[in-house]
Image: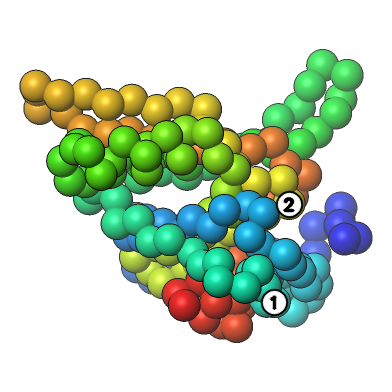
Amino acid sequence: MAINCALNRDLLRGDTCNYSLPEITQIFVANFDDVTAAPVSYDCESGVSITALTLVSGAKFYKIDPAKNSTTFTDELVVEDAGNKYRTHTITFNIVGKYDKDMVCTLDALALGKFFVVVHTADDQYLALGRAVGMEASAQSLGGGGDTNGITVTLSANVTESSVPLSQAAIDVVKG
């Protein structure tokens, strides 16, 4: 992927004069090893996107409906003392529902697995996180007995690319 390091367009306030609701309404998670291809069309003139997704036979993206207003994601630039630069993708979300015998293995899988993650925002954007290396749990908690009881999961990955929007063809694969 050839990255153009020169700014090539204006970023004007007038270009964003509309409503924007970046709240994450759904999270789609695939086991990282189940995604065999996720090519990126990297063209700063026409736009950057994942053009397609290919899964191993029988694999799918699993849908998570997070608790309302509980989900955040970041795509953060990290600059080390020696000048090395990379990005860290992080997503934190709360899982709705009760913790019971059926939730134990699911939480263990989220804690120990590696994932390709797609977020869907309320303004109908689909963004991939951890595309090249997969995301892994960096924190997970289960609480009960108070106003903040529930399950919180944080997945993160150090990557060498920004989060990437999905093309319609890739979205169709994610949605199944």
The answer to whether residue 148 is visible is no
Quadrant in the rendering for residue 54: bottom right
Residue 132 disc label: 2
As drawn, 21 above or below 162:
below
The residue under the point 76% across, 36% down is 86
Residue 155 disc label: none
Q: Which quarter of the rendering shows the N terminus?
A: bottom right
Image-based side of 51 in relation to 22, left or right: right
Q: How many discs mark residues in the rendered view?
A: 2
For disc 1, the marked residue is 51
The local secondary structure at tag 1 comes to loop
- In whole angstroms, how far apart are the C-alphas of marks 1 and 2? 14 Å
Q: Pick whichever, 101 or 48, lies toward us.
A: 101
As drawn, 161 above or below 140:
below
Image-based side of 78 in relation to 170, left or right: right
As drawn, 7 above or below 71:
below
Residue lying furthest top: 81
The local secondary structure at tag 2 comes to loop
Image-based side of 56 in relation to 70, left or right: right
* Lower position in the chain sequence, tag 1 or tag 2: 1
Three-letter amino acid code of the residue under disc 2: Ala
Q: Position of residue 94 (x, y in %)?
A: 29, 40
Q: Position of residue 13 (x, y in %)?
A: 52, 61
Q: Position of residue 107 (x, y in %)?
A: 37, 37
Q: Pick whichever, 92 or 20, lies toward us.
A: 92
Sort mark 2 into few (<14), some (14-19) or many (20+) by Cα contacts within 10 Å: some
The residue under the point 60% across, 83% down is 169
Three-letter amino acid code of the residue under disc 1: Thr
The residue under the point 19% across, 38% down is 100
